[in-house]
Amino acid sequence: MKRIRTIIMGAAGRDFHVFNTYFRDNELYEVVAFTATQIPNIEGRKYPADLAGRLYPDGIPIYPESRLEELIKELGADQVIFAYSDVSHEEVMHKASRVLSAGADFRLMGPKSTMIKSTKPVVSICAVRTGVGKSQTTRRVCQILKDMGKKVVAIRHPMPYGDLSQQVCQRFATYEDLDRHKCTIEEREEYEPHIDMGIVVYAGVDYGVILKEAEKEADIIVWDGGNNDFPFYNTDLHIVLVDPHRPGHEVKYHPGETNLRMADVVVINKIDTASSEGIDAVRRSIEEVNPGAQVVEAASPIFVEDPAKIKGKRVLVVEDGPTLTHGEMTYGAGYVAAKKYGAAEIVDPRPYAVGSIKDTYAKYNHLSVILPAMGYGDVQVKELEETINRADCDTVIIGTPIDLSRITKLNKPTVRVRYKLQEIGTPTLEDVLRRFR
């Protein structure tokens, strides 16, 4: 029987998980290629033979998504699997149209085909868009569960941008672990806050292997979702965040709408800074697509170490990279802090941008006076450092979840902005987590 020749479209995350859980040992299919997008410098690699399994002794090549139509024809692909997240419904169908016009079938893989069952209870925290506030919500959930006396282990949505064979299953318990695994800025932004709380984090490429290791030391697994992807594991409580700063996005992005429809609990975050119109709009969406979900309302208050470094100063604002790039936000916590604490001027970073940082502004032209903390590899971290150091400003406001001074050498004063989730009214997250006592 002829195997169905398959290309998997991805961004070094769900694509590998879909392959591992459904296609790896499936003799009905032959995966002839992955394509890669969204993240810089992740194409041109191979999914290695030691991960690909017995059907793929030479591994599987990874090509740029820009070559999709050409690859369908050259490789004789029968179908293309779409396997990445934080993409508008319209954009998904543009991708589908490219595939169909080249002659192949277009397919999405759902929870039944890709979710793995754990032997331990799983609480998942996901969202409808990048930059909604998953990280601080995950920290809040972990703290509540810890206060219940539970041993909590977080498993983070994948970010394997290096040597895939070395990233099968990674465990992070100390800052030294981050250095040893040569983590990117994006990875550090997600792992460091957990480490600061004493929470062990797992991540990597093979989420079957990862789950087995995490279960050895956990009473409860917390799935720390990335982008707006849905969980890799069957969940006992699915918590999903929506953003009233981007009303309507909760039903316009893939697979964010899937998350919203699956949610047991929906958190409306940022109600302290959103408009009443935006809050009402997301409430209507929740009522329309998932009226049975519990709704928790929350704020994300910011905290600044030394406001005097901001007041009256010319500041450069550095924000979380993915929130600004494919999350499409134009500002974050650093910008809010600059305004709140009376900065004299927010300095435009674009004239000082170098290398791939300059390229980022060209690609994401909605960005203006905010500097995204791009750091996918040593070269880009150096370019970010050079961009900051070239900027003519008095203070650098760091709105990322990590201390950039640990991995860069900056030549001007810095001030960090921290933020946490704070529920408003009832129910609270503690209320919805009581089932795990």
Image (spheres, rainbow, N blue to C red):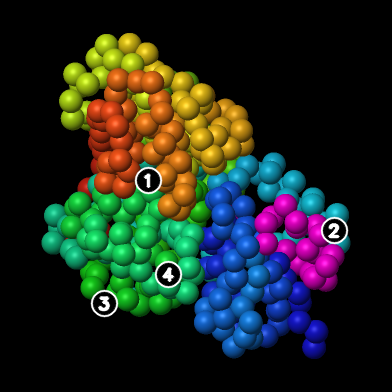
Q: Quick one: label 2 or label 4, which is nearer the N terminus?
A: 2
Q: Secondary structure at mark 3?
A: loop
- Separation of marks 3 and 2 at Cα, in angstroms: 47 Å
Mark nearest the camera among 2 and 4 is: 4
How many residues crowd mark 1 within 10 Å: few (<14), some (14–19), many (20+)?
many
Q: Quick one: label 1 or label 2, which is nearer the N terminus?
A: 2
Report the disc number at residue 134. 1
Report the disc number at residue 167. 4
Q: Image quadrant of residue 182?
A: bottom left
Q: Are marks 3 and 2 in contact (CB under 8 Å)?
A: no
**Picture coordinates of residue 232, whole percent (x, y):** 47, 64
**Magenta span has 71?**
yes
- Separation of marks 1 and 2 at Cα, in angstroms: 38 Å
Q: Is residue 436 left or right of residue 243?
A: left
How many residues crowd mark 4 within 10 Å: few (<14), some (14–19), many (20+)?
some
Residue sitting at 33 percent across and 34 percent down? 399
Mark nearest the camera among 1 and 4 is: 4
Q: Image quadrant of residue 29?
A: bottom right
Q: Secondary structure at mark 1?
A: helix
- Separation of marks 3 and 1 at Cα, in angstroms: 25 Å
Q: Secondary structure at mark 2?
A: loop
Numbered marks: total: 4
Residue 114 visible to an observer of this rendering: yes
Q: Nearer the viewer, residue 433 or 241?
A: 241
The boundaries of the magenta stretch are 63-85
- Judging by the rendered image, the residue that carries numbered circle 2 is 102
- Judging by the rendered image, the residue that carries numbered circle 3 is 216
